């Protein structure tokens, strides 16, 4: 059973930065693409970023491209989301997830993920 635990969320002023981490249990982390999603109050969950199993390829939502960077450290079973130039529109609960497809590239659809963390709150004040 895979467990994903996010950390690093918090309150930050607009224009600031945060780095989210997602620690995964299990020996199969390195074999799967990972992703970050977010859900704001009253809105549907949306794709933020994804990284291939090897870390060589990434994909981003247009709304975060150029501001957010996803990375992974397979030796530490951890995926990161570096967020900069934050705006109040980035306020949401952020979730990490593990793809259901072995050795895949980045994936953007939530249905392509079968393990999810509990989420970490990010609040950006204006």
Image (spheres, rainbow, N blue to C red):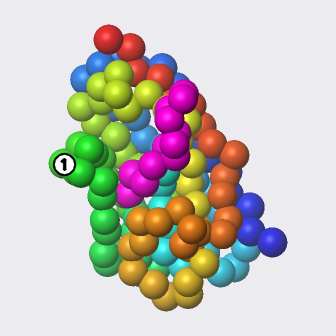
Residue 79, image x, y percentages: 50, 60
Q: Is residue 12 magenta?
A: no
Q: Which residue is mark 1?
A: 66
Count of numbered circles on the image: 1
Q: Relative to residue 106, is residue 65 drawn left or right? A: left
What are the residue bounds of the magenta stretch? 38-49
Q: Is residue 72 above or below residue 69?
A: below
How many residues crowd mark 1 within 10 Å: few (<14), some (14–19), many (20+)? few
Q: Quadrant of the N terminus?
A: bottom right
Vertical position of residue 58 compared to residue 54: above or below: above
Q: Going 65% across and 81% down the picture, which residue do you hit?
A: 28
Q: Is residue 84 visible?
A: yes
Q: Residue furthest left?
A: 66
Q: Is residue 83 left or right of residue 1?
A: left
- When asked about the image quadrant of residue 86, the answer is top left
Q: Is residue 83 above or below residue 53?
A: above
């Amino acid at each position: 059973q895979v467990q994903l635990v996010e950390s690093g969320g918090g309150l930050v002023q607009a224009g600031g930065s945060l780095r989210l981490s997602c620690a995964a249990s299990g020996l199969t982390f390195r074999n799967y693409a990972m992703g970050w999603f977010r859900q704001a109050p009253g809105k549907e969950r949306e794709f933020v970023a994804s990284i291939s199993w090897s870390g060589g390829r990434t994909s981003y939502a247009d709304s975060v491209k150029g501001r957010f960077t996803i990375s992974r450290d397979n030796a530490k079973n951890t995926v990161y989301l570096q967020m900069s130039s934050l705006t109040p529109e980035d306020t949401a609960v952020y979730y990490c997830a593990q793809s259901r497809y072995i050795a895949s590239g980045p994936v953007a659809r939530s249905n392509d993920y079968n393990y999810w963390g509990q989420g970490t709150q990010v609040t950006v004040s204006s």
